[in-house]
Image (cartoon, rainbow, N blue to C red):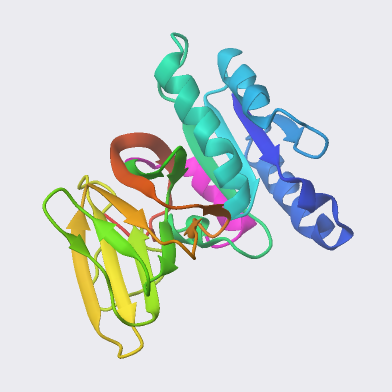
Amino acid sequence: MHVYIYDDYLNKSKYNKSVNRMEIRLTDLGLNGKIIRLGGIKNIKGTIQNEIKLGAKTIVAVGNNQTVNKIIGAIIDTDIYGDFQKKTLLGIIPIGSDNSIAASFGIKNEEDACNILLARRIEKIDLGLVGDYYFLNEASIESYGTNINLEDYSLEPEEKGTIRIINLLSDKINNINSNPHDGLLDVIINTRKKSQTILKLDKFNIVNKNEQLLVDGVISVKTPVDISVVRDRVSVIVGKDRSFQ
């Protein structure tokens, strides 16, 4: 059974055409399912977990990166701690902007997403973990003033720039082939001088007294915080043009 989780911003009139077009396409493909609208729901995690307990096998995020972020933890925690459902699938139908996660999975628009749901091509991928927050794509922070602490040593960039901690690429970076199957996170340090440092790490700590870590573009997390990768944690329905193999 498919359960479609509509983000509350889709209630705006400017999204009516996209939503109607998606719903017609899903009906044509025989992919009808239960619709849950997040507007007004206080316990989102509990609501989604209840649907999984009732037998939902595919949870589809209809919205953007923030929508995916809202539901991913509920899927994972239910699958780990429940005795009823062990392989809940995550599907994504992107509508509007801020959809880099969908793009990583080769999903370009709502019509494309419906066809991909029907094809049901499944990949089990790693997730990044920042404190208690999972991330699919990446986390980022200002490089200046940031310490990356490992067991034997630490790094502290001396120039302003950006530190990107990548599980799954949402854009093209020269010489970077991020692999969400290898149990490692790609840590890329870019400074004003356009120098680039690339590390592959599975566990480390980050500290910055003045800046917060931005997780998948939607959640800000204070440091110090531990960062790690969790192997093969989520099964996702993906397209052929995904950014990984």
Q: Quadrant of the N terminus?
A: top right
> In the image, is residue 79 above or below residue 206?
above
Is residue 135 found left or right of 154 in the rendered image?
Answer: right
In the figure, residue 125 lies in which quadrant?
Answer: top left
Q: Quadrant of the C terminus?
A: bottom left
Q: How many marks?
A: 0
> In the image, is residue 67 above or below residue 16?
above
Q: Nearer the viewer, residue 109 or 99?
A: 99
Image location (x, y in percent) of residue 225: 39, 47
Q: Please report the residue visible at 54 percent of the width from the left and 49 percent of the height from the top.
A: 115
Q: Residue pushed farthest right? A: 13
Q: Is residue 90 visible?
A: yes
Q: Please report the residue visible at 50 percent of the width from the left and 48 percent of the height from the top.
A: 116
Q: Is residue 113 magenta?
A: yes
Image location (x, y in percent) of residue 119: 46, 43
**What stretch of residues is rendered in magenta?**
108-124
Q: Please report the residue visible at 59 percent of the width from the left and 21 percent of the height from the top.
A: 49
Is residue 121 found left or right of 99 in the rendered image?
Answer: left
Q: Nearer the viewer, residue 188 or 241?
A: 188
Q: Is residue 27 magenta?
A: no
Q: Nearer the viewer, residue 159 or 4?
A: 159
Q: Residue pushed farthest top? A: 83
Q: Residue pushed farthest front? A: 209
Image location (x, y in percent) of residue 72: 51, 37
Q: Is residue 175 visible?
A: no
Q: Residue pushed farthest left? A: 152
Q: Please report the residue visible at 29 percent of the width from the left and 73 percent of the height from the top.
A: 189
